[in-house]
Amino acid sequence: MEKDPKKIKAAKARSESLSSQSRSEIAKKAAAVRWDKHNNIPQSQHSGELKIGNMIFQCDVLSDETRVITQSDFMNGMGMYYSGWISKNRSEDELEANIPQFLAMKSLRPFVQKHLGDFEAITLDYRTKNGNIARGIRADTIPHICEVWLDADDEISLGTRQKIIAKNAKEVIRALAKTGIIALVDEATKYQDVRAKDALAKIFEEFLTNDRQKWARTFPIDFYREIYRLRGWKFEPWNTKRPGVIAAWTNDFIYDRLAPGITEELNRKNPIGENGHRSAKHHMYFDPDKGHPKLKEHISGVIALLKASDTWSGYRKSLDRVYPKYTLSSQLDLDYDV
């Protein structure tokens, strides 16, 4: 988003005409606005240390799920510093835009506009776990901040200290090329575990009910007929007593591949009793409006693969390709002859 050159020129003229008292008043107003928001600012919910090379940054996931890097840690790690001269000579436009001081050097302005011009806020205040107010850098701006320094290193002459910042920026960019900044923060703060639990809770809410429903035929007879065919077993439709391995295969073919964590949650809701049997069928715990239709759709897909297969091993390979398991065991080598 390009700024109007006339407005920039006018802002510069206003800045140059400002007295030290006027600058102080602008800064105080900006601080007052931030202070008024402190009662409603996001709070740190998860915190940790993010390590990149020899740099260590304190990072947090806030109550609104914003990921931040503590500004002071980021500056120290990158070799940035506060400058009294820059602070004193910042333009009115920069003060009002709340551009961080470490990006307020005149030589960096074209690159800041290029890489960070579309961001409404680069930094924000938040409350730490111990109740203090801290200034953080939005994690999603970190790669763009690094790009500012990389471009500056390529296109203008940097001083010795600024060269160190550019070198560190390159190291950060290389690390982020492998794993994104959000993923790194989530790993450092252990928020990835919380996200996984929340995601599972939403899946269970969509698929399952707390109370079992009335029994309704869910597994067509063809499901069992095709398994028997591929195994070379004699199939008797009237005989409902089936080999115990069928239950294990049902978990494998259906529940393990329907959605993450479904099998484990069904086992929790519908455990095996002291008599060695469950009190109900797993499918009776599926929500009749959402979960049950998806379950039947998945079963139909599995039956189609069974019918299209000539061998048991061929079916298992097709099943893994079309419906990979969500559980860890999907990453292991399977014995297709079991």
Image (spheres, rainbow, N blue to C red):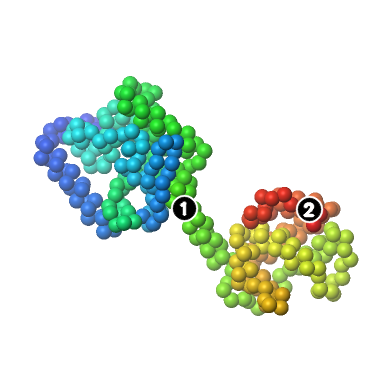
Compared across the picture, whether 5 is left or right of 283 comes to left
Q: Position of residue 188 (x, y in %)?
A: 45, 48
- The quadrant in which the N terminus is found is top left
Q: Position of residue 242 (x, y in %)?
A: 81, 70
Residue depicted at x 22% and y 40%: 95
Mark on residue 336?
2
Q: Secondary structure at mark 1?
A: loop
| Res 85 seen here | yes
- Distance (Cα) linking label 2 and label 1: 37 Å
Q: How many marks?
A: 2
Q: Secondary structure at mark 2?
A: loop
- Can you say whether 282 is above or below 14 in the image? below
Q: Amino acid at mark 2?
A: Tyr
Mark on residue 29?
none
The quadrant holding residue 173 is top left
Mark 2 / mark 1, whichever is N-terminal: 1
Compared across the picture, whether 84 is left or right of 41 comes to left
Residue depicted at x 40% and y 32%: 169
| Res 3 seen here | no
Q: Position of residue 135 (x, y in %)?
A: 29, 47
Residue nearest the viewer, comparing 254 with 160: 160
- The quadrant in which the C terminus is found is bottom right
Residue depicted at x 81% and y 74%: 240
Residue depicted at x 21% and y 47%: 30
Q: Nearer the viewer, mark 2 or mark 1?
A: 1
Residue nearest the viewer, comparing 113 with 159: 159
Q: Residues within 10 Å of mark 1 (few under 14, many from 20)?
A: some
**Which residue was labeled with disc 1?**
190
Q: Amino acid at mark 1?
A: Lys
Q: Position of residue 214 (x, y in %)?
A: 65, 78
